[in-house]
Amino acid sequence: MFKKIGTYLEMIKVEHTLFALPFAFMGAILGSAVVFNHLPSWGDIGWIFLAMFGARSAAFGLNRLSDQYIDAKNPRTAGRAIPAGLLKPFEVILFIIVSFAVFFWATAELDPFAFRLLPIAIFMLIFYSYTKRFTWLCHVVLGLTTALAPLGGWVAVTGQVDYKAIIFYIALSFWTAGFDVVYACQDMEFDSKEGLYSIPARFGLRKSLWFARGFHIVTAIGFIVLFFVTPVGWWYLAGTIIACGILFYQHYILSPDDMSRLQTSFFTMNSTLSIVLFVFTLIDLVVKYL
């Protein structure tokens, strides 16, 4: 049983929750500060965590199910649960159904407006899994999809979406798109051979790294703009400066001639960035309101 649980957790890349969870919480506390001038309740935070975990689990399950035959051909992904025979497709389908049920349940406990937005989230979760079959903008679609979790945190406690929430959403959409371009460089040759679409397969390694840098410049600008339009202070600004430094460093350590530190750039730097910016935002608002 424990081995099976471990297989499910590996399938959904539970460690990648370090990317999204801090920003989901950040969306909640920032939105609550903007609209209500106070921090969200612990109950809201708990339901946001459950909703995000259910949504991400369903999304990864859908992606693994739709890509099972592609993954089986790719030496890098052939060891994943479905192509390796560790999980049967019907087991993954059952897992997706349960994950969506958790997502619906948790969202229903939050603001009604968040629940009414569920069809959009579900469409994006399903749609993304097929985009690399027809557009090299699949990385941007992934960003727009995963950034729904932080935006959902904002909506869950405020019941509204304003321009500040949209700035937050765009910044995080391009953050994900940027590091996904870097990650996709591993499969550049495979994608080209199989007729799959990605920025690396379409434009090559050198131009792809410039795409990723451009996307992350948008992210940095978004973080800075939030300092001026939300009630955050110097703690947030300090976190933003560190986050921008991390963005710069993760591109500094990569070049078309040396991609050996791709995993450091992709996982270590991005999980550190999300935690740092959330912690500094939390400190900023705790100092302000408590």
Image (cartoon, rainbow, N blue to C red):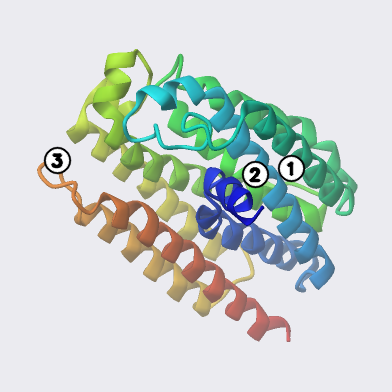
Q: Quadrant of residue 189?
A: top left
Precedes in sequence: disc 1 or disc 2: 2
Residue 242 position, x and y percent, is 38, 70
Question: Secondary structure beneath disc 1?
Answer: helix
Residue denoted by label 2: 57
Hey, what amino acid is under mark 2? Ser
| Label placed on residue 99 | 1
**Which residue: 79% across, 37% down?**
117
Q: CA distance from mark 2 to mark 3?
A: 33 Å
Question: Dot 3, crowdedness within 10 Å: few (<14), some or many (≥20)?
Answer: few
**Which residue: 74% across, 42% down?**
99
Asked if disc 1 and disc 2 are in contact, CB closer than 8 Å, the reply is: yes
Q: Nearer the viewer, residue 4 or 187?
A: 4
**Which residue: 42% across, 25% down?**
72
Q: CA distance from mark 3 to mark 1?
A: 39 Å
Q: Nearer the viewer, residue 56 or 74?
A: 74
